[in-house]
Amino acid sequence: MDFKTPIENIKYIGEKQSKKLKKLKIHTLGDLLFYFPSHYEDFSQITEMKDLKINEDAVIKGKIMELNEERSFKKRISILTILLQDDSSNIEAIFFNQGFLKNSFQKGDELIVAGKLKFKEKSLYFSPTIFEKTNKNELTHLGKIMPVYRETKGLSSKYIRFVLKPLVDSFKGKLPETLPDKIIKEHDLMSFNEAFEQIHFPKTMEMAEKAKKRFIFEHLFFISLSSLKKKYEIKNEKAQKIEIKEDVIKRLKDSLPYKLTSAQEKVAKQILEDLNIPHPMNRLLQGDVGSGKTVVAGLIALNCIKNKTQAVLMAPTEILAKQHFKTLFDILKKFNVNVGLLTGKEDKYYSYKLKTDTIEISRTKLLEKCANGEIDILIGTQALIVKKTSDKKPKVLFKNLGLVVIDEQHRFGVKQRKELCIENNDKIPHLLSMTATPIPRSLALTIWGDLDLSIIDKMPKGRKQVKTSIVLPIESEKTYKFIEKELKKGNQCFVICPRIEEDENSKLDLKNVKDEFENLKKIFPKFKIDMLHGKMKPKEKDEIMKNFKKKKFDVLVSTSVIEVGIDIPDATVILIEGADRFGLAQLHQFRGRVGRSEKQSYCFLRTESPTKNTIQRLKAMEKHASGFELSEIDLKLRGPGDFFGVKQWGFSDYVMSALKDIKLVEEAREAAKKVFLKLENYPLTQKRLESFEDKVHIE
């Protein structure tokens, strides 16, 4: 057997069990061997029967003196009573509705039993949760530290241990070491073989922790090694060297109605210097909502265009693509630039040669202009990278593409960039990825470690900080009166709900869009209200947002679909229902929907869960306006799973938890840097890196 052996070919795994194991993403022997315990229970300490305490977990060891089975008349269940005796005392262990065990026991058998001492109807008895006979060569479950695995219905930890024990024994001492010796010594790590054995069946809790540390470090090490490898590969590809046109940049800055912040100036300089090198840029631009990332992208795009190359900007939604089109059109229209818009539903074109601002244009005509180099910058959605389909829709191609800008999407591979080019196929366009969701440092070093990082950490002058308050149910009336005052001033309001409609199967009583829409119509009868949610068609959602921006209604009740990129300058209030159901990073994104003008804006966080933890987490929103500070707090409180894409990487719970530990992440990254420079000297590490990349689907 090797690691690729299908689980159905493994001893003791039948068809029924293999289906259940596959629910846990265990398909092969390798998957099973590296399916690590979620936690451990210490069953190594045997308690003498005389020292048992009521309702405390304990493990006892004794000889069967008597056994008796009877049936309960009322409940019609079997009651199997076993009298166990050790050197200190004796106790009855009672198994309810497990009469089938009677044939497994005989007088004189010695058992180890885990459970609790219970007191009922004036008598004491021991209630077992698990037991094991001691007449085996080695115990699998008790008398030791017991691993507990994440289970699924009909598949217990006991069964997983039973299957794993002989497999782990068969591989004992035979697995190759994947880390260089010097890294193991420097960081005081267990060897691979010892860690593999101790993580499944540890001798002590201390050994279990050391084994976990070894595998966590290894995983972080290979994440870092993979990102360094990608960075190196990209730096060795060819790209067009784009010179810095100082005069053009100065003219654009002078044409703006405001001055760029020092943070915008700093990141623009970093990016321009990257472009002035004949290797592809691979940079992530982080900046809070409203910090001015699009203006920086416009400046960079213009510099590329004046170097006779084209640029493309891809946004996650049609609404955001149109918003970028308008912003960039306003910035670039004085610079003799042709701008195109391509979405799933709408195609537009602006040329400095036209007398009108923009014209509607056919998809075919737009793509022709793009392919022959007439369009300098094309803005759109995923439609930009859709390959030719059966309905003969043509593919988007550029004559001389120099820059790809991706908004709120962090993976855009070299292959995808090459596919957009016609003439310069040997050269790869530069990539600038942008996000308004600040990434904690540990995630930036690992998952996005192949990208160079630029941060806009200052907001433009004149923006007032959004005033944020926690609202309890008792304060509802007061909150609605405040919102009404804002609406009377001609301002607008967002109301965010965790659900689209009521869920009868849920135990949680969460506000939903459809009911809240009806409720608010009664609360604000003099104002117009509309709703928005993910089940609506894109065209319908676009229409609602257009109407909201045009102030055709006053209050928008929505789900989290408004999280990214919608700019409504007159929206001054956002009320987030069930705020405790969202992560801080997401709440900060919601809050960024208001405060888009000079007007004072407000964010209300309503919760019906006034627990200490909930209030403590939401108070961070009241205290911190910086998304970067909130992202670090969110990582500590909720873990990395709430950050975009992290859940999809297939990391174990151990590694997800370790991503909070910046010190360990930095140690693993430094170790990876040392090894990467001499990777050819470590063939086993190189081989493990290949299988690691294949397993976690790193692009």
Image: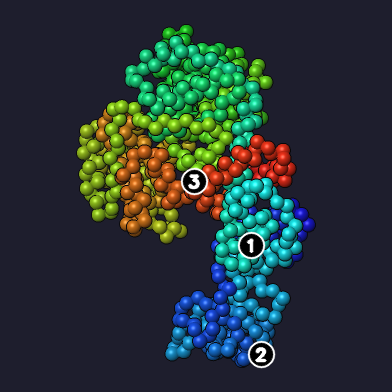
Q: Work out whether residue 599 can be spotted.
A: yes
Q: Quadrant of residue 428?
A: top right
**Residue 107, numbered label:** 2
Q: CA distance from mark 3 to mark 2?
A: 57 Å
Query: Horizontal and vertical percent for residue 556?
Result: 34, 39
Q: Which residue is mark 1?
A: 198
Across and down, in percent, residue 692 comes to 66, 45
The residue sitting at 42% across, 60% down in the picture is 507
In the image shown, does 461 or 452 lie closer to the viewer? 452
Q: Of callouts 3 and 1, which one flags the residue occurring earlier in the amino acid sequence?
A: 1
Instruction: Kindly identify which residue carries mark 3.
Output: 662
Q: Quadrant of the C terminus?
A: top right
Viewed as shown, does residue 208 lie left or right of 597? right
Q: Is residue 677 above or below residue 58?
A: above
- Contact? badges 3 and 2 (CB < 8 Å): no
Residue shown at 41%/13% (left/top)? 250
Ranked by sequence position, the earlier of labels 3 and 2 is 2
**Label 2: which secondary element:** loop
* Amino acid type, label 3: Ile
**Upstream in the sequence, badge 1 or badge 2?**
2
**Residue 193 vertical placement versus 659 (above, below):** below
Between 428 and 20, the residue placed more toward the observer is 428
